[in-house]
Image: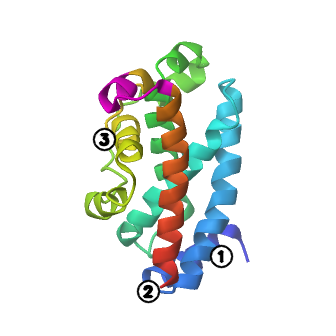
Amino acid sequence: MTAETELKALMVASQEGDAVAHRLLLERLSIHLRAYYKGKLAKLSRRLAESEDLVQEAVLAIHTQRHTYDPVELFTPWVHAIARYKLIDFLRRDRATIVDAPLDEAAEVTARDDHISAESSFDLSRLLRRLPKKMRCSIEAVKLEGLSVAEAAERCRISEASVKVNIHRGLKVLSTLIARRTQT
């Protein structure tokens, strides 16, 4: 069985309400996305640790947008589109990367993102409300509104280091909440 066939079958089962298939899908996608982001970040001479945040963001987006996937279409291109948009958003938030990007990557980094948002605002809002206030503020400011860490620190009235920690921990909490929801 190819990765496409296996992942697509898991997605279809997930869309039909199979919590075990959904959890397995997210686990398998995390492995694929981790490799994808590590490769992309290595080309940009970025820290590989940043790939974990990107994996969490992409998995969250895939979870909240699974209802938009059309089973008639191939699955992996749909996933890679979401992963690519998450990478572009990440690189946009970190403007220094644009200067460092190789010319063949520059178009991808600066490309206009006309894609419909990969987050379902209703599901995401409900999940975010379950986070502590400072953690929620950090994630909303940086990950949803695109503010820099410094701008988020000012808005949330915490240190830049606290913003980074809140985002990292908050994304892990959100992943756990999603996993619990899919198990019921």
- Residue closest to the eye, 137 or 52: 137
Q: Residue at x 58, y 75 (%)?
A: 23
- In the rendering, at what x and y percent does residue 128 appear? 35, 56
Magenta stretch holds residue 6: no
Q: Distance between the residues labelled 1 and 2?
A: 16 Å
Q: Which residue is drawn at 30% across and 63% down?
A: 126
Q: Do the residues labelled 1 and 2 touch (CB within 8 Å)?
A: no
Q: Is residue 50 left or right of residue 93?
A: right
Residue position for label 3: 114
Q: How far apart are marks 3 and 1 (CA)?
A: 30 Å
Report the amino acid beneath label 2.
Answer: Glu
- In the rendering, at what x and y percent does residue 37 appear? 64, 42
Q: Which mark is residue 49?
A: none
Report the amino acid beneath label 3.
Answer: Asp
Tell me which segment is drawn in magenta: 151-160
Colour scheme of the rendered structure: rainbow
Residue position for label 1: 6
**In the structure shown, which secondary structural element does the residue marked by tag 2 occupy?**
loop
Residue position for label 2: 16
Q: Mark 2: few, some, or many residues within 10 Å (few <14, many ≥20)? A: few
Numbered disc in front, either 1 or 2:
2
